[in-house]
Amino acid sequence: MAKEAKTNAMRMLDRQKVKYEAFPYECDEFIDGLHSADLIGAPYEQSFKTLVMEGKSGGYYVFVVPIEKEVDRKAAAKAVGEKAVDMIHVKDILKITGYVRGGCSPLGMKKPYPVVFDASAGGFEDCLLYTSPSPRDAH
C-alpha cells in the first residue's frame, strides 16, 4: 500500500491531533478556487483561498478569503498596519511559502507569517482543507 502524500499543513494538524478530512485532487495546470471546489464537491460558501501579499515594509502577510471574492487591498493593509500591500509575484510563491500556486495553505509555510481570515470563515464548525501537494511536501 502506497504511503499517503501529505502537505506540511496536514503534518501540522496531525502533530496537534486535529481531526480533518483530506480532499486530494490532481491538478496539472493552475485552476481557480471555484474549479477546485467543484472538483471535490465542496460548497463555495465554505471554501477559501490563501493569498500572500507583501507590505510596503517588506513583510509578508497571508490573507484567507472566500474563493469567489477578491482582497480589498486598502482594508488588507489597514488590517496588518501597513500603508499598502500588493500580491507577491507568481514566480516567488514557492520560494516564499514552500507551496506551489493553487496549493497554498496558511498552515505549514516555510516561515510563520501573520494570517488574516475573512470574518465569514468563523461561522463554520468544520474546516475544509484541500490543497494539491507542493514539490517539497509530497513524499
Image (spheres, rainbow, N blue to C red):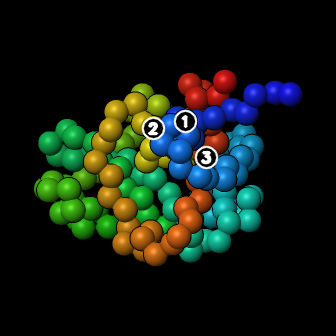
Residue assigned mark 1:
11
| Residue 70 at x, y percent in the picture | 42, 66
Residue assigned mark 2:
108
Mark 3 or mark 1, whichever is nearer to me: 1
Instruction: Identify the secondary structure beneath mark 2.
Output: loop
Specify whether 93 is left or right of 75: right
Specify whether 97 is left or right of 21: left
Q: What is the spatial separation of the Cα atoms under label 3 and label 2, in whole angstroms?
A: 12 Å
Look at the image and tell me in which quarter the N terminus lies.
Answer: top right
| Residue 73 at x, y percent in the picture | 28, 62
Q: What is the spatial separation of the Cα atoms under label 1 and label 2, in whole angstroms?
A: 8 Å
Instruction: Assess disc 2: are there few (<14), some (14-19) or many (≥20) residues with their C-alpha within 10 Å of its C-alpha.
Output: some
Q: What is the spatial separation of the Cα atoms under label 3 and label 1, in whole angstroms?
A: 13 Å
Instruction: Identify the secondary structure beneath mark 1.
Output: helix
| Residue 122 at x, y percent in the picture | 42, 71
Residue assigned mark 3:
131
Give the mark count: 3
Instruction: Assess disc 3: are there few (<14), some (14-19) or many (≥20) residues with their C-alpha within 10 Å of its C-alpha.
Output: many
Q: Are marks 1 and 2 in contact (CB under 8 Å)?
A: yes
